[in-house]
Amino acid sequence: MKPYFFLLLAILAEVAATSALKASDSFTKLIPAAIVIAGYVVSFYSLSIAVRTIPLGFAYALWSGIGIIFIIAAGFFFYR
């Protein structure tokens, strides 16, 4: 169960980072830019922990597929 926790953390961090990318205004706003950088660091680190146990193809498919669904939802609710 622990690797799936890290996979979920990777997905949520990536969604937060990608959602903050627009708010960072080409990295000219400090707080959103910091969220982007921190989010991607946490996401890739968590994904690297998850793929120690979960097969790479399966983990990447979940990470990208669920991430896309969440990004669509975040874009709809936050940016219309």
Image: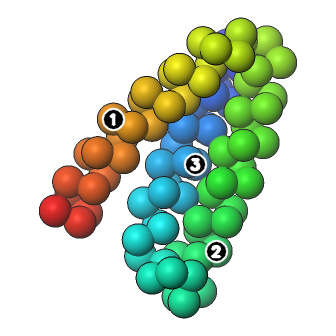
Earlier along the polypeptide chain: callout 2 or callout 3?
3
Residue 35 can be seen in this image? yes
At a point 27% along the width and 56% down the height, the residue shown is 75
At a point 59% along the width and 65% down the height, the residue shown is 36
Label 3's element?
helix
Q: Amino acid at mark 2?
A: Ala
Rendering coords of residue 73 (x, y %): 26, 45
Answer left or right for 30 relative to 64. right
Rendering coords of residue 78 (x, y %): 25, 63
Label of residue 34 in the image:
2
Answer left or right for 40 relative to 18. right
Q: Which residue is mark 1?
A: 69
20 vs 46: above or below: below
Q: Which residue is mark 3?
A: 13
22 vs 10: above or below: below
How many discs mark residues in the rendered view? 3
Label 1's element?
helix
The reply to whether callout 3 and callout 1 are in contact (CB within 8 Å) is no
Q: Amino acid at mark 1?
A: Ile
Rendering coords of residue 70 (x, y %): 36, 40
Label of residue 57 in the image:
none
Report the residue that reaches farthest toward the left.
80
Label 2's element?
helix
Q: Amino acid at mark 3?
A: Ala
Earlier along the polypeptide chain: callout 3 or callout 1?
3
Eye-nearest disc, 3 or 1? 1
